[in-house]
Image: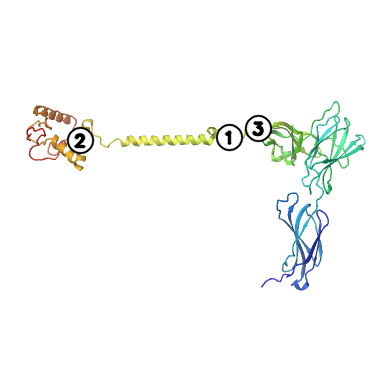
Amino acid sequence: MCPLVPTAAPRDVAVEVMNTTVLRVSWTPVPPATLRGHLKGYHVHWLRKRSFLNPDKILDERHTLSFPGKRTHAIVPNLDAFSEYTLTVNVFNKKGNGPSSDPVTFNTPEGVPEQVPILTTSNAQKESIRLVWAPPLVANGILTGYLLQYHLINETTKEARDSWEMNITGPDTTHWQLEGLEEGSLYLFHLSACTRAGCGPPLAQESSTATPAHHNCSLSFPRLIPDRATHPPPLAPGLLNISSYVSDTSAKISWTAREEQQDSQLYVAYMNNRDGNWRISKAVNASQSFHVIDGLNPGTVYTVRLMAKSLLDNASIFEDVIQTQVTGAAGQPRSISTKGWFIGTMCAVALLTLIVLTVCFMRRNQGGKYAGTPPPGRQDVVAMDKVKEKEDLHPDEESQAMNDDTFCEYSDSDEKPLRGSSCSLNGDDAVGDGVSRDSLVDYADGGGEFSEDGSFIGEYSGHKRGGSVTEPNGFGPVSA
């Protein structure tokens, strides 16, 4: 069974933008018959879709407010200026929410900017002072410029002796050289950011022009002076191991904060020495221990200053002149032969190659030796045995004819020593007998072994045949 929630949505939803952050919404209540229970109230839902300062970025910021009881309107606060919204309304009872109304689209107008986060003075001369600031973090509209008000202060009574006002056009302007000031005088400056809706709250800063004996070149820090009371400025908190590292388009400022300074805030200011434009970073916590300045121009000289974020601090902690590297000079890759991974890989390959060669050499030496290698005098006989076995296994006509024509048949006889083992081509038996005796003596000296019948003839003879062998040259037969 479905819960008995309301079945109708509020009608005639209308919105009235009261200012940049507040909205009045009204509607026609749902008929009582569609409530299906006791009326608990109305929900107002609104969605911020985008900011007109960045219209291409789609937002999805959803909010809801509940208004109990029977009512026909409500006030919606905390909207963002210069943005596009959609809004719906639905009724709810004890069981749940009813359907939402048709969405209504509306826009909030531009508002005045927030206060600029920082205002500093630098390069105080006898008749001029340079002002440097950062744009507001929330503009609430399109910046049109800044309103500068400055006053000549009587250092005894702390009252303004004279006042001036000027409009600084250009939303990208972050510095101004103020000329025509009195030598050695105290001035109070107020700076406000402006949009078409007006100017935001000012930030105040005091500074003095230089006297002939005093030339002030340090940065001073913003100080709100609601009652124009003066305080002796304490020393800026010291940091340890401040250093800078520069690449072609960025610079890294590093420091070490003492334990008591971990929660303090710092600003990093930098100036392109070519155009004299100062830019100031957002607040950086000292415990972060570094800040990276991006978007620098290659091969350009900059002045960098590290400053403490305090309403009363009036000094620069660190100042350095740096020069970014030329594009490609620092970014060029090192030779591959000097990279550690390449050297390690080459060493590993050389070691593996040496191991493989060593193993192959050892296996080759082992494979060239035969178990039970005969003595030197026996090696020729063993070689002949292997040749003979190969010929017996694979006989052919040519080798058979050669065997028949070359070797003679021997037999075991009682006559010792044996007669020649090969037939003489010239019929000289004496020579044949001499060769046979030499072979027998060499074999005996080599430690050869006789066959089972006491004869070594089988080591040399071919297939035994009966009868005699006739020489191819027509010599007479040699009988056994």
Q: Amino acid at mark 2?
A: Met
Judging depth in this view, the residue of 15 and 436 nearest the camera is: 15
How far is disc 1 from disc 3 in space, using C-alphas?
Answer: 14 Å
Q: Amino acid at mark 1?
A: Pro
Pointer 1 residue: 333
Verify CB contact (< 8 Å) between mark 1 and mark 3.
no
Judging depth in this view, the residue of 355 and 262 nearest the camera is: 355
Q: Position of residue 230 (x, y in %)?
A: 87, 37
Marker disc for residue 384: 2
Marker disc for residue 113: none
Left or right: residue 248 compared with residue 46: left
How far is disc 2 from disc 1 in space, using C-alphas?
Answer: 69 Å
Verify CB contact (< 8 Å) between mark 2 and mark 3.
no
Q: Quadrant of residue 255?
A: top right
Q: Position of residue 436 (x, y in %)?
A: 13, 30
Pointer 3 residue: 326
Colour option used: rainbow
Q: Quadrant of the C terminus?
A: top left
Q: Amino acid at mark 3?
A: Val
How far is disc 2 from disc 3 in space, using C-alphas?
Answer: 83 Å
Q: Residue at x 79, y 45 (%)?
A: 143
